[in-house]
Amino acid sequence: MKLLLVCGARPNFMKIAPLMRAIDCHNEAARRNDRIEAKLVHTGQHYDSEMSESFFRDLSLPNPDHYLGVGSDSHAKQTAEVMIAFEPIVLNEKPDCVVVVGDVNSTLACALTAAKLRIPVAHVEAGLRSFDRSMPEEINRLVTDAVSDYLFTPSEDSNANLRREGVPEEKIHFVGNIMVDALRKHQDLARSLRAYARYGLPAFGYAVLTLHRPSNVDDSGTLLRFLRVLEQVQAQLPVLFPVHPRTRDHLRAWGLMETVEGIPGVRLCEPLSYIDFLSLLCGARLVLTDSGGIQEETTALGVPCLTLRDNTERPVTVTHGTNMVVGTHPERIMAAVGAVLGGEVRLGRIPPLWDGRTASRIVKVLAARENSRSVEAV
Ligand code: UD1
């Protein structure tokens, strides 16, 4: 069996790495004709060293077999560029299945391209829904799931979403959260690094902030409101803020970089590599974020997380984990910060199948289907 595995943007790399490893393990145990050939495609949606290369290094990912070098552009252009560059690769490689992960533009573009060439598509992290179509990722999730043949889900709520949309049961495979595979593998190293010490911060005596959602950073008034919140949070504990390129560009364009640099308890830094960031999460008292993946990582680590959005496509992090969706209003955010610092910590529990073995479940499903197809062919 031949698979094309697609990654493109920062949140993809820690989902692809466990799959590559699980395929290697499968191949070590498999008979010669049951082996899986995996080719890695990197679309180049993210291209800065801190957004891509450092993740390849930390996660021991091999160099991609195909690099599409697509880069940044409007949604339509970026998606179209990926499709145009990916199509000849699919035609030449003739894979048995294209595997896409997550919900970024590269996920959607490669799923669509493969589906139109009648190549089966496997979507890892299927079924997540924020029910907010103003989020580009929600459109990507809906379309990717609609054209996928294998829907690998991380949680029971995603199974329910797919069923409600009429997806046949045999396409839904509840396998757990693949990010947790990467996290468990690197967690001990991350803890031992104590990356916070580099910024002069004490263990469990700081907050981590990340902000990059267009709804939070593409409007100057909204971004300024977050900086005002940041002033209040740092009065209670220091804040480390790794700045995403989109946010950095907007802070600069609107002359707000000096404002944030001038807040005394805030340490700004470049986007961090996978293990350094994990290390910071491990030692944090509190995380404030609008990221999807960080809601899951904090739940897996038992660290309190305040999600600076009005909704989440990952409700299991709230029902089971340590996440609270607090929205974007300063009073609500500060009330939640006060509650966490006052000791109202939700311990949370680990959601079902977030056990570090998701990738091997996925490989098992793909290999079994391929075997049954070759038996049918005979
Ligand atoms: C993308 C994903 C989002 C994910 C996020 C994680 C989509 C629709 N969005 O958002 O779901 O949470 O990645 O980071 O796919 N830029 C750089 N260097 C890079 C990459 C981007 O400077 O390596 C800058 C460019 O100015 C670019 C902007 O960031 O225009 C946005 O990049 P893009 O990939 O379009 O979206 P993200 O906001 O990163």
Image: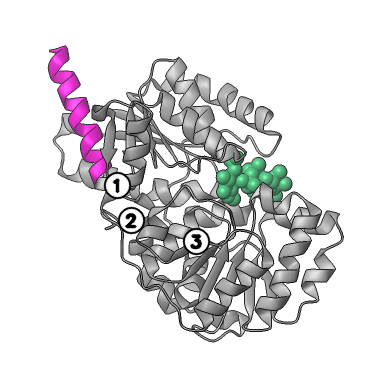
Q: CA distance from mark 3 to mark 1?
A: 19 Å
Q: Amino acid at mark 2?
A: Asp
What residue is rendered at 42% in x and 67% in y?
322
Residue at which label 3 appears = 274
Q: Secondary structure at mark 3?
A: helix
Q: Secondary structure at mark 2?
A: helix
**Extent of the magenta region:** 361-378
What residue lies at 28% left-to-right and 25% top-to-bottom?
168
| Residue 346: percent from left, percent from top | 40, 72
Instruction: Looking at the picture, tell me which residue is in the foreground, 268 or 139.
Output: 139
Please state which of residues 173 and 95 is positioned toward the viewer in this rendering: 173
- Whether pointer 1 and pointer 2 mark residues with C-beta atoms closer than 8 Å, the reply is yes
**Position in image of residue 261 (x %, y %):** 78, 73
Decide if residue 22 is on the left or right side of residue 105.
left
Q: Position of residue 215 (x, y in %)?
A: 67, 48
Q: Is residue 292 magenta?
A: no
Image point 44% across, 15% down: which residue? 117
Q: Is residue 234 left or right of residue 109?
A: right
Task: Give the labeled residue for mark 1.
Answer: 359
Q: Residues within 10 Å of mark 3 (few under 14, many from 20)?
A: many
The quarter of the rendered structure image containing the N terminus is top left
Q: Label 2: which residue?
A: 181
What is the residue that sits farthest to the right in this orientation? 255
Q: Quadrant of residue 247?
A: bottom right
- The amino acid marked with disc number 1 is Ala
Q: Earlier in the sequence, mark 3 or mark 1?
A: 3
Q: Quadrant of the C terminus?
A: top left
Query: Which quadrant of the figure has residue 153?
Result: top left
Vertical relation: 315 (above or below) 29: below
